[in-house]
Structure formats: C-alpha cells, structure tokens
Image (spheres, rainbow, N blue to C red):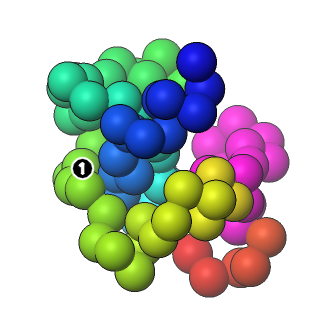
Amino acid sequence: MPSEFFRVSTTWVVDFSYEGRARRVFKIFGSGIDVSALMTTELRELYGDKAKLIETRQATDEEGGAVPARRRAEKRLLPHRPGRWTDRRQTL
C-alpha cells in the first residue's frame, strides 16, 4: 500500500559525479535497502563509466521534511536528457 511505504520510507541524499561534475539527487527508499549498492548499480546502468557514486546518506530533517515535501523534492529532480538532471528551482 503506498501510504504504508511513505510511513516506513526514508529520504536519502545521493551525491555522485558525472563526467567530473558534482551532482545530487534525493531518493526515497523503504527500510532495509542497501542504498549504496543500489545507486552504484543504477548509475552504472544509466551512465556507464561516466558516473561515480561519491556518497549516500540519510537526509537531514531540513532536507527530508515531511512526507509531502519528500514527494515534491523527488518530483523536482527530473531527468532532462541523458547525463543531466534538472532541478526546477535551479539550486543544484
């Protein structure tokens, strides 16, 4: 059930580099997930050797916020084209 997922989910900050440029995305994962391994695999599948995972960590309260804010944050980061993420607020 989707509402149950958000009760037990956590917002994660994923820092990585793409072609030497720093990138950050916010992702929501359920409990018991190895986020580093999952994101390493996802980045490799999406970008091959061009991307490198730098760090994954749980978001702070300010970064994560309430459940509706988490969902908005994840929706703000949209893949614009391969290798480029667009933040509608243009803060990244």
**Looking at the image, residue 32 lies above or below residue 53:** above
Q: Mark 1: which secondary structure?
A: strand
Residue 12 x, y percent position in the rendering? 35, 51
| Residue for badge 1 | 56
18 horizontally vs 59: left or right: right
Q: Is residue 53 above or below residue 60?
A: above
Q: Is residue 30 visible?
A: yes
Q: Position of residue 70 (x, y in %)?
A: 55, 58
**Quadrant of the image occupied by residue 85:** bottom right
* Quadrant (top left/top right/bottom left/bottom right) for the C terminus: bottom right
Q: Is residue 42 magenta?
A: no
Counting labels gives 1
Magenta run includes residue 74 = yes
Residue 2 in percent (x, y) is at 60, 26
| Residue 23 visible in the displayed image | no
Picture residue at 70% right of the left edge, 67% below the top: 87
Q: Which residues are magenta?
A: 73-87
Q: Position of residue 22 (x, y in %)?
A: 41, 65
